[in-house]
Image (cartoon, rainbow, N blue to C red):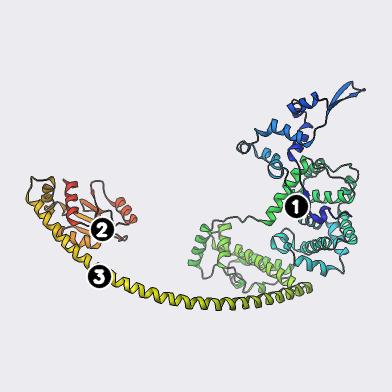
Amino acid sequence: MDKNMIIFNGLRCKVNTKAAFVDMCMETPALASKMLASPVVRSECERKVCSLEDNEKSGVYALRVELNEEKREQIYEEIFGDKLEEERFQELSEIHRRLLEPIRVMHQKETKIDVIPFIVYGVVRNSRCKSMLLESLKGCEKECLKLFQGSEYQSAGFLRKFLLDERKAAKLMTGLLLLLRQEESEEQYRMVMNIIYAGYKSLKNVVKKLDYLTGKQFEELMRKDAMVEISLCQMVIEMVIAEDLDIPRLMDYQFCQVVCMLKIYEERRLNPQEMETDMAEGKRIYRKFLREHREPGAYYVSEFLETENQEMCERWERMEKLLNIFGMETRALYGIYLEKWEAEMLCTIFEEKDWERYKYVLLLGTLCKYIQQIEAMYESEIPEEIQYQRSCEESAVKSLEYERKRMEERLHKLERQKTDKEHELAEAERLIERLRRESMKKDEQHEREKTELNKLREFVFCKKGEGKAESTSDGIGSQMLDVGRLERSIVIGGHRNWQKKLRRCLPTSQFLSSDYMNFDPSVLHNKKYIIVNTDILKHGLYYKIMNERKKEQKVVYVHGNNVDRTLREIARQLG
């Protein structure tokens, strides 16, 4: 018994896939001619490392050239290398990409596949293997279950591939393989092989007639009308049988393709991809039911029993009969309900808007949830499961005790840090108070300077208004005083103080604040001018104004908080 067999260490390989691909092409007549025309082959012929073989019966001479892996890899690069670069690889069809996947994924790379899930699936799904397994493990089930419960295969994703009555056998087979890897016993190895041979005797008879286990054997398994996963499990079992019978395994290109497929299924098991579901429609349907009914996520049997609808009563009687056949009673459903997200998921999947039909879907959902609870109750009553749970609880208590001590130490450390931070905070508050007083003084000085600046600006503005010929702004200033044209206008946006000052100059205009989103659109109907201050204005309000305004209404854009400049800008745009 070799300890390097895949049943102990998994499937390990490192293959020059480019050389293997060339070997496969050489067996294809359409491609062999291109291979023989390669400069590498011609150079080998010139060096006379090839030989001619004479077939006396047919009178045909055969050319034989022996090339090592390096030479075959050179042939691949010369013929296919440039054509199969990454950019051009994406242009190939799905079939061709799968064909070339081994070259991209596992060329000269160490590859390892965990074969336990495939062996377990192949054994449990074979009725003869399953019966032999249960018979062989009588008396040592406890040890196998214990190893399974402490392994990575205990996850729900691994057991979900099996039916409920198959899961115990799956746990036992997994535990037996883990025990074999742990103890490496010849007796246990023979037990595993006897379990496999019980259901795969015909496969054993095929393998023992072979000189080599080649990729052709795997192709024959794929041709059978079976699930891909079943075929892959049978391929792994075929490798295990070949190793037991000392049949060498030829790592040709078809073998590399099988390894890639096994790798894909292994990654799906270890990293399952969760489907993203759009719950928007389901939530909308659930909200509709919620408005019409008290608890659309709860299911009460009494609703069916007390209904006056004859058809529903007949259906419920049939459902009652079905439950009784499976050993369940209707009262077992009392108190069972779905969470809100579960009911929303039902609405998302079925999109059932009819309340009566929705209740039947809800019944199916509650039954599924009830069956899961029965399964959990069944497993909790197994003595081995109880013992394992107790050991887990003891380990959890020890972990929590350690965590409590660690948290107490961290609490003391945080209290010390808190004291230090309080001192820093008090110092910061004193600094803030001092800066606040300085800021108040600066603000008072700023207000005084601002008042003086406003007086100076008014003085300069009045001086400019006295002479009409000095600048064009004087003419605009006179137009600014003519507010009659702005009688039917509305001012939107800007700071409140700016609006307050502008209201004195435009007493007949209407004003809207920059964040008043719920205004009545009718205020725009009789307006001739819409004055918009773009400095302070919400985008939503602006788009709403633009949607409601009429084509003949003129929009005047202003900015800044200077009222005088605003009036001049309005006059200029209306001028």
Q: Nearer the viewer, mark 3 or mark 2?
A: 3
Query: Mark 1: few, some, or many residues within 10 Å (few <14, many ≥20)?
Result: some
Marks 2 and 1 sit apart, C-alpha to C-alpha, by 69 Å
Give the image location of residue 395, x and y in percent.
Answer: 71, 74
Amino acid type of the residue that numbered disc 1 sits on in the rendered structure: Ile
Marks 1 and 3 sit apart, C-alpha to C-alpha, by 76 Å
Give the image location of residue 508, x and y in percent.
Answer: 16, 58
Q: Which residue is mark 2?
A: 494
Residue 459 occupies which quadrant of the picture?
bottom left
Query: Mark 2: few, some, or many residues within 10 Å (few <14, many ≥20)?
Result: many
Q: Most extreme residue toward the top, as rendered?
A: 59
Give the image location of residue 103, x and y in percent.
Answer: 70, 41
Amino acid type of the residue that numbered disc 2 sits on in the rendered structure: Gly
Residue 406 occupies which quadrant of the picture?
bottom right
Which residue is pictured at 85% across the width and 43% down the height?
213
Marks 3 and 2 sit apart, C-alpha to C-alpha, by 28 Å
**Quick one: 430 or 173, which is closer to the camera?**
430
Image quarter hosting the N terminus:
bottom right
Q: Which residue is mark 1?
A: 113
Viewed as shown, does residue 73 lie left or right of 570? Answer: right
- Earlier in the chain: of badge 3 and badge 2, it is 3
- Earlier in the chain: of badge 1 and badge 3, it is 1
Q: Secondary structure at mark 2?
A: loop
Viewed as shown, does residue 400 lie left or right of 16? Answer: left
CB under 8 Å between callouts 3 and 2? no
Is 287 located above or below residue 403 in the figure?
Answer: above
Q: Which residue is mark 3?
A: 441
Q: Most extreme residue toward the right, as rendered?
A: 56
**Quick one: 527 or 365, which is closer to the camera?**
527
